[in-house]
Structures are given as structure tokens and as C-alpha cells.
């Protein structure tokens, strides 16, 4: 079948790999002009995540670019350590930069996948014989299926199910990041500093900023608007914050978004399906990358098992992956409160608890249980 996938980050190329392996003809459309590079580190943990990566044959390629775990350290304004997550806990079984992960996945899918960079879906009509798609470039094509792997702000979800406001819940925080010179962060991890409701962090050539806020009214497609919000919110914050902000206007890999949760009751309708963050995103802290890899494997596998009949495969996909994915998603609900507690008392309490090994062990056991709570069929 000719299958269009919207999004070339993680879930999209992972799905394209499996679809190509089963003999389909996937096409990936990506609004960015090229694959994004750099970015923050992301991790995979447990036998479920690692098992799917091994089935794809990409573990060796990922190990060649792995970051070997990232220490997460909170410091005071003078740089003195207040709390630390050791690398063996924070980094999972395999940790890589997001840009490297995307490149490896696209390389794996490349032989059987067509890529349309710098374009996006502008309109789509699902009918009995296929999905008629009009792209922003003016190109028009028909596909047997369309898959939305285009993140928490999914256009495919909007076209198929309705406005974003119906499915995306703001969780009280915003998060941002951009690349900076490596010399500004410690080589062994990420260093972060708090004031009440704000966090600024840097490590391994990238920043992570997080601040508490109700939902903001701004143009999400205008980077200058987001940069102005950051400068306003972080005015007067000490530590390395002014220096980090000095790079925000020239950074190529700037991103800014709300911490949110996607609550979509259904992930498929007609010839259209959602996968990854478009279906059950949590922005940060919800094991989204591992869930995307697993979900792509299941969606493609169920299509193969059903002989390409989406009316059989799509319900099986939702039934098999739904409970698991929504469980891992829960981890994102507390991410903002952890990174940027509302009060000075909250910051001290966070530091005290996370300096206790028993609390860290409990926290990562919960995360580990969530990441392994699924038995997968061997589709191939």
C-alpha cells in the first residue's frame, strides 16, 4: 500500500522502517527543510524498548553515538551542588541525542521510504477508496492510509478528530531549549538552577529551560514571540541564565512549547491513524520516545497480520497498545513540578527527597514498571 506518514522525528521513521519491511511504500512528509540535529538527550530503558530496537537492527548504530547516561545536577546561584541524579539512573539503558536518534531511524527506513521535506499536509479527504491529500506546496496525491506522527500539535489529528483544544491539556508549565557552545555545560551531564517557578539548565551543548505559567496566548509558529516570552520570564535571574539567553536569537535548533498531555479517546478513524505523541504525547517525562518506537512496531505489525486490512488492524492496534501508552504518559504529569517547583519550600523539599537513594530507587522502579508493562507479539 501507499502510506503517507506526517512527521520525520521518531515515530514516523520508525513506522516507515517496519512498513517498508512488510512490503508497503511509505512516504514521510516533514515540515522542516531537513532533519533536525542536536537537541537534548533521550533514553530507552528496559527489555521492551531495547527489544524493539534490536528487532530493527539499530542498537549498534545508536551505541556509536550514545551519550552514556546524563548526570542531572541542581545547583545554587554560586554553582554549589544541591541535588543530583546519577547517570546510571537518569540515562536508562541507552541514551542518545534526539537528532542522532532521528537520523539513525531515517537511515534505517531510507531504502524503502520517500521523503518530502519542507512540506506539510494542507487538506485531506478520507473516502472509500483512499485518502486524497493536498500538500502546502500544491502537490496532490492519493494514499491508501495516512498516519499522523506529527507530535502533540498534530495536524492529522486536527483534520481527522477536531480542534486541538479538545484533546490537549495544558499542565501548567512551558519548556524550551536551544544549542549553545559545549564549554558552557559540564561534560558529564546537565546542570540546572532554580528560583521559584523557574529553571534554567545547560549541558552537552544544549539548554533546557522550564517555567510555571498558565496557558499563554502567542503565535506558536513565530519563534520571535517565544524568545520574547523567555526573556521576559527570566529577567533578573542569576547564575548562567543571562549568558545562556544571549544565544537564543542565533540558535538554529530553538524550540519552545507547553508541557501538555494529549488525551485522545480514539487513535484511528477510517483510513487515518495516530502514533506516538500525536496519539498520547506528554511533551517531556512521559517516556514518549520509547512508546513511539513500540507503538510504531505494533501498528505496522497489526497491519501485516491483517493482510493490510486497516478495518481489522487499527482496532487491534488501539486495543494492544492503548493501556500501556497511557500508563507511560502519566510520568509527564509531574515533570514541570519536578523541574521548577512553585515555591522555595518546594525546591528544598524536592532536593531533600531526591538526595535519598531509597526515593530515587522507588522513582525509577515506577518508571521501569511503566516501560515494561506490555507483552509484544513477534510479528516477524
Image: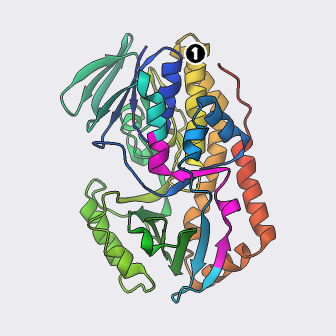
| 126 displayed left or right of 287 | left
Residue 83 coordinates in the image, percent (x, y): 65, 78
- The image position of residue 29, as x and y in percent, is 33, 32
**Residue 361 shown left or right of residue 349 in the figure:** right
Residue on which the image places disc 1: 304
Q: Is residue 94 magenta?
A: yes
56 is higher (above) or lower (below) than 195 = above
Q: Residue at x 56, y 26 (%)?
A: 299
Left or right, 264 with reference to 206: right
Q: Which residues are magenta?
A: 83-103
- Residue 278 in sight: no
Q: Quadrant of residue 226?
A: bottom left
Q: Residue at x 26, y 65 (%)?
A: 250
Location of the N terminus by quadrant is: top left
Q: Is residue 320 visible?
A: yes
Q: Residue at x 71, y 73 (%)?
A: 354
Residue 172 coordinates in the image, percent (x, y): 49, 65
Amino acid at each position: 500500500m501507499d502510506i503517507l506518514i506526517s512527521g520525520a522525528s521518531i515515530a514516523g521513521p520508525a513506522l516507515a522502517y517496519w512498513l517498508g519491511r512488510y512490503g508497503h511504500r511509505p512516504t514521510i512528509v516533514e515540515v522542516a527543510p531537513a532533519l533536525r540535529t542536536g537537541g537534548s538527550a533521550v533514553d530507552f530503558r528496559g527489555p521492551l524498548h531495547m527489544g524493539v530496537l534490536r528487532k530493527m537492527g539499530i542498537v549498534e548504530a545508536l551505541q556509536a553515538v550514545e551519550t552514556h547516561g546524563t548526570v542531572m545536577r541542581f545547583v545554587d546561584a554560586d554553582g554549589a551542588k544541591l541535588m543530583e541524579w546519577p547517570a546510571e539512573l537518569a540515562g536508562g539503558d541507552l541514551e542518545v541525542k534526539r537528532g542522532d536518534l532521528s537520523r539513525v531511524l531515517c537511515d534505517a527506513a531510507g531504502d524503502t521510504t520517500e521523503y518530502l521535506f519542507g512540506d506539510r499536509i494542507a487538506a485531506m479527504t478520507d473516502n472509500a477508496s483512499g485518502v486524497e491529500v493536498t500538500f502546502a506546496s500544491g502537490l496532490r496525491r492519493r494514499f491508501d492510509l495516512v498516519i499522523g506522527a506529527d507530535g502533540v500539535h498534530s495536524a492529522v489529528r486536527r483534520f481527522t478528530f477536531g480542534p486541538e483544544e479538545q484533546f490537549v491539556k495544558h499542565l501548567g508549565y512551558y519548556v524550551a531549549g536551544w544549542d549553545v557552545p559545549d564549554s558552557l555545560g559540564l561534560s558529564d551531564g546537565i546542570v540546572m538552577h532554580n528560583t521559584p517557578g523557574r529553571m534554567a539548565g545547560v549541558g552537552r551543548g544544549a539548554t533546557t529551560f522550564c517555567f510555571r505559567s498558565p496557558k499563554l496566548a502567542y503565535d506558536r509558529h513565530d519563534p520571535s514571540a517565544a524568545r520574547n516570552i523567555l526573556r521576559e520570564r527570566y529577567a533578573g535571574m542569576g547564575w548562567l541564565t543571562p549568558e545562556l539567553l544571549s544565544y537564543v536569537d542565533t540558535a538554529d535548533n530553538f524550540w519552545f512549547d507547553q508541557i501538555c498531555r494529549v488525551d485522545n479517546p480514539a487513535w484511528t478513524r477510517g483510513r487515518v491513524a495516530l502514533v506516538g505523541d500525536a496519539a498520547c504525547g506528554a511533551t517531556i517525562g512521559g517516556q514518549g520516545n520509547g512508546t513511539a518506537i513500540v507503538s510504531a512496531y505494533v501498528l505496522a505489525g497489526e497491519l501485516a497480520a491483517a493482510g493490510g486490512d486497516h478495518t481489522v488492524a487499527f482496532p487491534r492496534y488501539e486495543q494492544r497498545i492503548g493501556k500501556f501508552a497511557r500508563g507511560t504518559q502519566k510520568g509527564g504529569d509531574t515533570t514541570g513540578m519536578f523541574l521548577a517547583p512553585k515555591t522555595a519550600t518546594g525546591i528544598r523539599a524536592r532536593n531533600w527527597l531526591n538526595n535519598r537513594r531509597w526515593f530515587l530507587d522507588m522513582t525509577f522502579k515506577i518508571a521501569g514498571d511503566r516501560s515494561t508493562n506490555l507483552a509484544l507479539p513477534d510479528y516477524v
